[in-house]
Amino acid sequence: MRPVTALVLCAALASTSLLTGCGKGTTGSAASPAATCASAAPVDDPSGRTWDNVRVVTGECGPSGAPSTGFEVTNTEREALTFTITLTLVNGFGEAMGSTTRTVEAVKPGQTVRRPLDTEEGPGSARGRRARITKVRTVPADEAPAAAGACPASGVRVTTDRGDAAMGLRVVGIHLENCGTTGYRLDGYPALQLLDENRKPVTGVNVLHGTDKISSGIGGDAAPRPVTLAPGEFAYADLAWRNTTTDGDPVNVPYARVTAKPGAAPVTVTPELDLGTTGRLGVGPWTKAGSE
């Protein structure tokens, strides 16, 4: 795995132990006034519950003293970051029992934020759970997709879906919601900048207009036409590729910087493009949802 210098994350493992600082940011983050914490300490981790310099720690804390497994993120970069952490939950035998994803928004440079891994059952509901870090993604906070219920200053929310795969063909949708108060006009294709795991530009990939350049029948092969979204309406654009691998090194693109139209604020999403060695990505035009 690559070094993840921007993150330190912990998942408390023992059923009777608690995570240091869960629910409390050490520098200006929101916290429950009832939370109390003891110092954290690293523990042996023979089962691979690490992500490079991400390590497992245990301690004691929790709202009103309730036991809880949790995690910790530390931003060591020079800009505010939004972290998305995927964890696999395991039982006492190390068997996977499911997965969960947590997002920690706008962590400031030098800031540490600790959160419990509680479920909807409330404080202490994660007692006895164990967790393995499966994936960590970080994007600049001012380019992160807006959380549900929050409309950014741009008036639009840009996200991606989980996609679909069949016999080496991959399709992922980029979705744009007009969450503002006025109409929003689109015309053409979203502009994409592909980024590697270090959020550096990926070269050698041809971004093609039209998904028919990849496969027919996907639905993103129509000519672009103007789209005007009223408040509350949606548009989408499909990404299509094949993950065929022949000679050479396969190309994986976890991040894509999406600009909906010229002059729009970019949004960095995580479509997880496994492009193989094909060097091609098809992009469909913006289409109003429900207009097919």
Image (tube, helix red, strand yellow):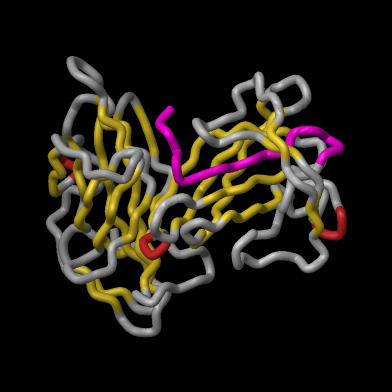
Residue in the image at 45% along x and 38% along y: 4
Relative vertical location of residue 119 with respect to residue 262 in this rendering, above or below: above
Say whether residue 125 is visible.
Answer: no
Position of residue 56 measured from the top left corner of the image (x, y, whole percent)? 65, 34
175 magenta-colored: no
Point 71% across, 50% down: residue = 116
Q: Is residue 187 above or below residue 44?
A: below
Residue nearest the observer in this picture, 179 or 26 = 26
**Percent position (x, y) of residue 47?**
65, 21
User: Magenta span has 2?
Assistant: yes
Q: Is residue 102 left or right of residue 221?
A: right
The residue at the far bottom in this view is 182
- Residue 43, position as x, y percentages in the image: 71, 29
Residue 34 coordinates in the image, percent (x, y)? 82, 65
Magenta stretch: give its range: 1-17
Q: Residue at x 60, y 23 (%)?
A: 48
At 62% from the left and 47% from the top, the residue drawn is 72
Q: What main secondary structure does the magenta stretch of the protein show?
A: loop
